[in-house]
């Protein structure tokens, strides 16, 4: 459906872009840079019961919730999807997503695999991108280097990473986060290519075709 929009230059709905990556791959770092390089992109902020890490800001990185508060959000149908992941709850609030897309903005969700699959079911046109670390050795180095998790949690997250990588075939695209600038460029290229897809531009094609 074509709606008035402020977000893009082609008069159409924005994309729903879903990014997943094993914890520690660098997606937080990557998405921060992506945000700076792409002004038509809006980020969905998830709710979680995980404790905030150093430098994480409530309302910007996550909405940090108690278990009771989170369960209330679930009961009141405020979440598009939610999961339990490494002993914490995470979920995507639905409130702003559809209005932003209707305004022409591309909206990015950062969720783990189950969440990505649920989003795809609800929004079949969504674009799924899986970000991989260059190797498992580099992944361990990055999680350890970040210094935010205890050793036993690091092992748990690495084990989880191995099982997550097996599901990469559920995604449309794969980006390797080796050199960060290149990974940012790759994601921007995917978004632009998706915007230019024939099937997403039928309206403009018909409008131009109608002028002959
Ligand atoms: P995630 O959000 O995937 O859990 P972070 O963004 O917190 O991961 O990154 C984990 C660690 O890896 C951080 O210390 C970060 O500085 C580092 N990092 C991120 N991207 C890269 C990269 N391309 N090359 C090297 N180190 C990186
Ligand atoms: P972290 O604790 O490292 O910030 O996130 C752990 C995992 O939860 C990551 O894979 C991240 O993508 C995922 N995640 C964050 N928010 C959501 C969400 O709203 N829904 C789902 N399904 N996963 C999420």
Image: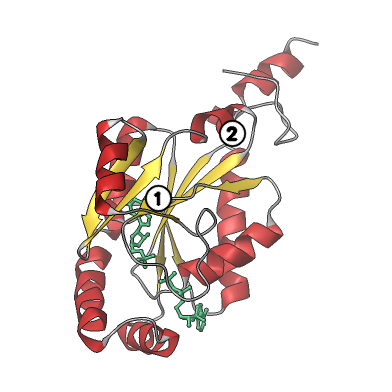
Q: Where is residue 144 in the image (x, y as percent from the top left)?
A: 36, 88
Q: Position of 125 compared to 158: left or right?
A: right
**Mark 1 Cα-neighbour bin, 10 Å: few <14, some 14–19, many ≥20:** few
In the image, residue 14 above or below residue 86: above
Lower position in the chain sequence, tag 1 or tag 2 = 2
**Residue appearing at x 38%, y 81% in the figure:** 148
Q: How would you rate the neighbour count of disc 2 (Cα within 10 Å): few for under 14, some for 14-19, many for 20 or more? A: many
Q: Name the residue under label 1.
A: 172
Image: 164 above or below 55? above
Q: Which quadrant holds residue 30?
A: bottom right
Residue located at (27% from left, 66% from top): 165
Task: Pick the quarter of the image with the C terminus.
Answer: top right
Q: The N terminus is located in which quarter?
A: top right
For the residue pair 60 and 128, the one nearer the viewer reads as 60
Residue 198 is at least partly visible in this image: no
Query: Disc 2 on helix, strand or loop?
Result: helix
Q: Nearer the viewer, residue 212 or 202?
A: 202
Which residue is at the front of the view, 167 or 115?
A: 115
Q: What residue did someone put label 2 on?
A: 100
Q: Do the residues labelled 1 and 2 touch (CB within 8 Å)?
A: no
- Give the x, y percent position of residue 73: 32, 38
User: Would you say 96 lies left or right of 144 here?
Assistant: right
Residue in the image at 57% along x and 75% along y:
180
Q: How far apart are marks 1 and 2 (CA)?
A: 22 Å
On screen, residue 41 above or below 22: above
Q: Quadrant of residue 12?
A: top right
Write down the quadrant of residue 157 in the picture. bottom left
Tag 1's secondary structure? loop
Q: Is residue 71 or residue 163 the one in the foreground?
A: 71
Label of residue 143 in the image: none
Q: Position of residue 131 (x, y in %)?
A: 42, 65
Label 1 vs label 2, nearer the camera = 2
């Amino acid at each position: 459906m074509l709606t008035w929009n402020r977000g893009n230059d082609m008069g159409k709905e924005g994309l729903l872009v879903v990014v997943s990556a094993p914890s520690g791959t660098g997606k937080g770092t990557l998405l921060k840079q992506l945000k700076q390089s792409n002004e038509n992109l809006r980020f969905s902020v998830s709710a979680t019961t995980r404790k905030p890490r150093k430098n994480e800001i409530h309302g910007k990185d996550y909405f940090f919730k108690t278990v009771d508060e989170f369960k209330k959000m679930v009961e009141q149908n405020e979440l598009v999807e939610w999961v339990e992941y490494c002993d914490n709850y995470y979920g995507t609030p639905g409130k702003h997503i559809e209005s932003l897309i209707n305004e022409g903005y591309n909206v990015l969700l950062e969720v783990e695999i189950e969440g990505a699959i649920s989003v795809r079911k609800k929004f079949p046109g969504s674009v799924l991108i899986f970000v991989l670390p260059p190797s498992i050795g580099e992944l361990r180095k990055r999680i350890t280097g970040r210094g935010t998790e205890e050793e036993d949690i690091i092992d748990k997250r690495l084990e989880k990473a191995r099982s997550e990588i097996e599901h990469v075939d559920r995604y449309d695209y794969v980006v390797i986060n080796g050199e960060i600038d290149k990974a940012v460029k790759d994601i921007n290229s995917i978004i632009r290519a998706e915007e230019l897809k024939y099937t997403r531009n039928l309206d403009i094609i018909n409008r131009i075709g109608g002028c002959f």
